[in-house]
Amino acid sequence: MTSTALQPAPISPGAASDGQAARISVRERIASQVQRHGALAVLVLVVAIASATSSTFPTWNNISSILGSNAFVWLLALGMTFVIITGGIDLSVGSMFALGGVLGAYGSRHGTWLAIVLPLAVGAAWGTVQGLLIAYARMAPFIVTLVGLLGLRGLLQAVTSEGATTYLVPAHSWFRNLGAGTWTPVLIVAALFALGALLLTRTRFGATLTALGGNEHAARLMGLPVARAKVLVYLLSGTLAAGAGALGGARLGSGVTTIGVGYELTAIAAVVIGGTLLTGGAGSIGGTVSGVLLLAVIHNLIDHYFSQYGSAFTDTVNGGFLAVVVLLQTLLSRTQQLE
Amino acid sequence: MTSLTWPGAALDRGRLLRLLQEYGVYAALVILFVVAVGLDGSFLSTGNIRVQLYQVAPTLLVALGMSLVIGTEGIDLSVGATIALAASVVPLYAGYGLFAALAVALVLGAATGAVGGAMVAFARVQPIVATLSLMIGVRGLAEIVNGNSAKPITQSGLLGLGSHTLGGVPEMAWIAGVCALLTGLLVRRTTFGRQLVAIGDNRQASRLSGLPVRRVLITVYVLSGVLAALAGVLIVGHGAEADPANQGLNMELDAITAVVVGGTPLSGGRVRVLGTVAGALFMQLITAVLTQHNVHTSYTQIVEAAIICFAVYASQERGTR
């Protein structure tokens, strides 16, 4: 501490003189750019290395399997981006994904419309309840949605009589078309991500979310509808998760009760790797796309190179790789150092 | 303020809420216990109480470490995997005696914690993501170590640690109790404890006032890893089997729930060790009561979820954030 008592300058780490302070602000600006696109940079790097070292990676078959097989799960990350931007978290999405699949498969036996409406309605209703508890009862999002994670699994098991009943999507049902092939899932997911990006960057609602995540108190003093925005965010996340589950059910042809365990953590990882701060107030849908693709590519590579050693080995490498990616991405962006 | 003149009115809404927040978890624990005994008198039998203590001890150990981590505004998702890793090495070293196995397990727990702590303290990775990558990787490692299968333990020394009783109380519960006491002293009576709480309250200010932020953060995650590893060894000793694919699964969520139900805020800056003990007991009691009355697991989960929700609502910090 070299500053004298006469300097009323706001406390900032390492700020010794005006010149240095100016330099930090430039550095900060560059750092925030890198942070915003850090995942993209790592993604390009990983894809380039993979394409150069493996002859099977850049093939059409492989790319369509990366894009197609898990596309609907990515919707969890889309909803999670909105939640995290407000400074919240939604742990219930993995269970909701499974429940959505079961409800979709169940509904499809009575018509495609029910297969779509039933999961969406349940997802929206549950999301609204979570949002109300968080916004009005002021409960911690972590706890409310943890309760969602447990409770929805319970509900799922009740619907399927302890997992003994599996609902199949009828073979002739039009509902199956929604999940079929490579391109239908990718187009649906891409369209929803595009809508999400517009919602976040071009609407008053999106601006409210960012303001609320940055400083909730200030947002409230500015007269922004903070509580309503929070409820809507969890509503959105729940609906997306249930809808994603239903589409996944359409793809698989049945509702699988054991699916979705741990998906919430994958979604959170994708969002955070994409540069959205868990503390809220900063983030982008584009970043989440990079994060999601990065995780998918890593998974594909590990499957390709290590699956012969068994699933335990794959998990170990996966965890290690995730750690390296997160480290790399954090080291690329030094803004957090100035938090 | 008329509430000052008339004692009955002193219990106005704000004060009631504050009381609930401070002592809600203990009240809930007592009520639940009374309900459990009322529903079934045999709940009070020494046999049953002993079973409950066996089951709560590992959760409590993990929750103690978790409460320290949460006190620094962090979270440790890797504890379940650390349990599995500690469990996986026990069969390998059990032949050399209890202490060899314990030492190896604890060192591995400390190492896992150190990796997570270093990522949080030095690289400034967000705790949830740093420990998430450990959670995935370390469980895989545990399964590799154990050759992808459950292994039985036959050495009597290890079985003793998990199954013996001392004065009618399981040794596991004694160990967990002593750890709780030490954790309480650590938080309340030591410089380290005060630094930990200060860092959780305001990291920036702590750094500027010269606190050893990085050292404290790493130590906290190492402690969490060591306590989880200890829990892992006790679980193996009690079950007489190491099963890394399943042991410790979801333990991180149980521990976090116990900590938060006990009144430690997720926003850091405060650690309530006694609350964590009460929280762990509370969660254990709910599960016990529901399973003993043959409630189906699907409904058990729903009821548990609802009770957690209410308990947290009653005990949470109000007005802040």
Image (cartoon, rainbow, N blue to C red):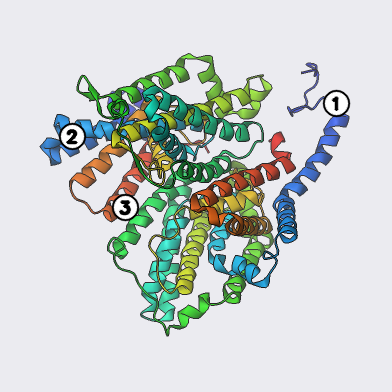
Rounded to the nearest angstrom, the CA distance separating label 1 from label 2 is 68 Å
Instruction: Please determine whether, in this image, residue A81 is positioned above or below residue B29.
Output: below
Q: Give the residue furthest to the bottom.
A: A172
Badge 1 element? loop
Q: Earlier in the sequence, mark 3 or mark 2?
A: 2
The answer to whether one can see residue B208 in this image is yes
Rounded to the nearest angstrom, the CA distance separating label 3 from label 1 is 58 Å
**Type of amino acid at the residue the image marks with label 1:** Ser
Instruction: Please determine whether, in this image, residue A314 is positioned above or below residue B206.
Output: below
A24 on left or right of A112: right
* Residue behind mark 2: B48
Rounded to the nearest angstrom, the CA distance separating label 3 from label 2 is 24 Å
The residue that appears at 35% across and 61% down in the rendered structure is: A156
* Residue behind mark 1: A17
Badge 2 element? helix
Mark 1 against mark 2, which lies toward the viewer?
2
Residue A59 screen position, x and y as percent:
68, 69
* Residue behind mark 3: B302
